[in-house]
Image (cartoon, grey):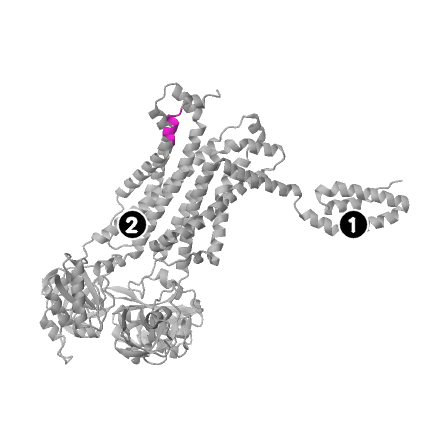
Amino acid sequence: MNQLPPNWISKVLGRICPAHMCDEIEGDLFEYYAELCEKKNRRYANRKAFVFLILSAPGLIVKRKYHPPNSIDMLKNYLLIAIRNIRRQLGYSTINVVGLAIGLACCIFIGVYVVQELSFDKFHKQAEAIFRVNISYETAGASGKSYTTPTALLPSLRRDNSKVATGVRVFNVSMFSPVVVQKENTKYQEERFLYADSSFFDVFSFEMLAGDPAKALAAPRSVILTASSAKKYFNDEDPLGQVIKVDGDDYSITGVLSDVPDNSHMKFDFLASFSSLRASQRETWWSANYATYLVLTDPDLAKEVESDIHDLYVKNLGDQLGDVKMGFDLMPLTDIHLRSDIPSEMQPQSDIRYIYIISAVGLLILIIACINYMNLATARSAERAREVGMRKVLGALRKQVFYQFMGESIIITTLSLIIAMVMVSIFLGPFNHLTGKQLVFQDILSGPVIIGLLIIAVFVSFFAGAYPAISLSSYAPGQVLKGSFKRSVQGSWMRKVLVGVQFSISIFLIIGTLVIYKQLQFMRNKKLGYTTENVLILPTDNVVNQNFDRIKTQLERMEDVVSVSSASESPTDIGGGYALSVPGYVDEPMNVQAITVEKDFIETMNMEMLFGRDLTDADHKQATLEESSDRRFSFIVNQELTKTLMIAPEDIIGQQVNLNGRQGEIVGILNDFHFTSLHRKIGPLLLFIEPRQFNKIFIRIQPDDLQKTLLSIEDLWKQIVPDRPFVFDFMDDEYNAMYRNEMRLNQVFITFSILAILIACLGLFGLVSFSVEQRAKEIGVRKVLGASVASLFFLVSRDFSRLVLISFLVAGPLSYWLMTQWLNDFEYRTSVGFLPLVVAVSCAIVVAFLTVSYQSLKAANMNPAETLRSE
C-alpha cells in the first residue's frame, strides 16, 4: 500500500520550509503520515497532514526569513579576520587610519563652517517671506548699489500695496558714528546701535526675554538692550523701566533681548524706537539712509513688488530722476549674508563663492585620504590572494568576499571617524581663530551635521573600499592556489594614477595658496593715493564736532603729531551717492561719490594735488553763511571725474557745479586714490567742506614713540570732551579689514595645503615601504652584482619622482586657469605668473623626495644576505 502523502503537501512544504531544515521536517512528516495510514486510513492521514501544515506554516515562514546560523558565524568570522589583519599590518593600518582621520576632521570642520554659513537668518519664523529692498542706479558717469531707502517707501507700500503684509525700517546709526551710552558713571561708546519701527518683531523672530514686543518700540526714546548689554550696564539688576542716556538724551528701557545669534546678518546690542529720530517724522523720497525689510503675502510676488516700487519712485520723483536709471531688487533675507554684492553692508558679509571653494578643498583632502586606503589595500593584494582563493574553494561567493573587504573598510572608517572627532574637539579653538567663528562642540552634534557625518562615513567606506574589494574578490582560486597568480599590470598602473591624483590636488592647493598670498601682498603694497600708516581714526559726534577746532589746535601743538583733520567718512570706504550737475557739460544730473572734509585733510592723508588749490579757512567760512542763498561751496575733484566729463584739467578749474543743491565751483584736481575696495574701479569723486558733518577725526603721527603719543592724545581728549570715551582705530587696520575674507581664504588654503601634502606623503611612504618589501630580493641580487647605493636609491625613487612631475603637468595649467578666474574678481590685481608654479612643483618634488628617501636609503643599505637567505 502506498503510504506517501500527496505531492501537493511536499510542494507546499518546500515553499514554506527553510532550506537547511526541509529534509529533516519532510522525513518526519512522511513517517508520521505512514503511521496514521496504518492506524486509520489515507483520508484521515491527509486531514492530519493538512492541519500540521496550517499550524506549522507561520513558524516555518518566519524561520525562513532569518539568516541561517552559518551566515551569522560567517559575519563574525569576517569581523575577526578584519581585526586580525589590521593588527597584523599595524603600520599600514596606522597610515590608513591617520590619513582618513585627518581627512575626515578637515571635512567635519569645513562641514560645520558651511552649515553655519548657510544657516544665516533662517532662524526667523517668516524667513522665506522676508525680503530687503536693494536699490541700484546708473548714470552716464557712474553706477552703484545700496540697501538704504528713503523714509517714505515703507509707509507708501503699507498704505497702497496689498502684496506687502508688513515691514520695518532699520537705521544703523553706528554706520556714521558710534553712540555714547551712559548709565550714571558707567559710560561706553557703542558701535552696534540700531533704530527700528515698532513693527520690528512682526517681521523678525529675535527672542524677547523681558518686555512686550508689541509695545517696546512704540514710544519715542524707547530702547531694548540685549542680555549682554543689560549685564554690562546693570549687572544683576533688572533694567526694565530704567533710564539710560544715549548721546545725552534720556531713553527708557522697554525690553531685553537674547543676544543676537551669530548667524544673523544684522548684529546689534541696542535697538531704539524709530520714532526717536527726527527724520522719521518726515516722509521724504530723497534721504535714503534706511534699510527696508518687507514681509510679502506670497514670496512668489517679489518681482511684482519690485515693479510697484519702481512705479512709486517715478510717481513721487518724476523728472527729478533725470537720466538716472533706477533699479529695485527684493533680496531674500537668507541670501544677504552670502549673495549680497553691495559694497557697504550693515555688517561685513561673506561670499557664496568662498563657500564653494572651501567645500571643494575639504572634498579634495578627503579624496586624497581615500586614495591612500585604496592604494595600500590593492598593493597588498598578493598577500591576501591565498586567503581569497581558499575562501572561494570552500564555497564563498564573490559577493561574500566583496562584503568581507568592504567590512574592513567600514571598520577602518569607523576608527578614523572616532579619532577625527577627537581631533575636532582638540583643534576647534584654532579653527575658530582661523575662520573668525565662535563654534562649540555642540554645533557638531546638531542634526544636519550628524546626518552629514553619516553620509560622509558611508561615502568614504564605499569610495575607499569598493575598488580594493572588487579587485580582490575577482581573483580566480585555481591560479592563486597553484602559485601562478601574478600581479596585475592594470592594478599597478591604477595605483600610479591615484598617486598622481593625490599630488595633482596637493600642487593645486599650493599654487592656490601662493596666488592668494601674492594678491594680498599686491593689495598691501599697492599705492592707494593716500597713506594708511601711522594714522589714527577717532569717531566723533555732535559734542566732539563742536569742540573740534579746540581739539585740532591742541593736537597740532604736540611734537609727535604731524597733521589733523576730519571727514564724514574714511577714505578707505566712501559710500553714498550724490547728484552732480555741470552746466554746459552734463544735461542731466550724474551720480557721483562725495565726502565732506575739513581743511588739511589732503595733507593729513598725504594725497597729491595735481591742479588748483587746497581747501582753506575762507572756503569754510563761505560754507557756513546763515543765508543759504549766499552760501557757496568749493569742490576738489579727482582725475576720474575730469575723464568722465571729458574736460581738460585746465578748463575744469573754476567750473560752476551743483551737488545735491549745493552751489559752488571746482577749485582743485586731486590725483586718483582708491576710496573703496580694489575689487572695484575708481569712480568720480568730489571733496568739499560742510561744517558739522564730520564723523571721524584723522591724526597722522610720528611712529617713534607710539605709546607715549597715544597717552598724550588721550589726556587731551579727556580734558576737552570728558563725557566722550577715548576710542580709536588705526587706518591700516581698517584697510586690512576690507579684505578679511581673502585673508581667511589664504589661511584656509595654507592650512589645508599642509594637511593635503601630509596625507599624500603618508600614502607615498606606505607605498614605498611596500615596494621595498616586494623588491627586496631584486635589490639584494643587484647589490651582490655590484650595484652602488646611489643606483639602488635611484631605482626605488625614480618612479615616484616621475609621478610628481606628471602631476604638475596636469595640475599646473588647470590651477593657472582657475586662479586667473579668481583674480578677475579684482579690478586691480596681480597676475598668476610662473613663480607660484615653479615653487609648487619644487615643494612637491622636495617633499616627495624626502618621503621616499628614508625607505630608499634603507633598502639600498640592506644586507643582501638577509634577503637572499631563503634562495
Q: Does residue 395 appear in the picture of this structure?
A: yes
Q: Which element type, helix, strand or loop, lies under badge 2?
A: helix
Nearer-N-terminus badge (1/2) = 1
At 34% from the left edge and 42% from the top edge, which residue is drawn? 507
The label shown at residue 679 is: none
Question: In this rendering, would 456 be left or right of 9?
Answer: left
- Quadrant in the rendering for residue 210: bottom left
- Quadrant in the rendering for residue 566: bottom left
Toward the top, the furthest residue is: 785
- Quadrant in the rendering for residue 124: bottom left
The number of numbered badges drawn on the structure is 2
Q: Main SS of the magenta segment?
A: helix
Identified by mark 1, the residue type is Leu
The label shown at residue 53 is: 1
Q: CA distance from mark 1 to mark 2?
A: 77 Å
For the magenta stretch, what is the residue range?
855-862
**Which residue is the site of mark 2?**
516
Assign the N terminus to one quadrant of the image: top right
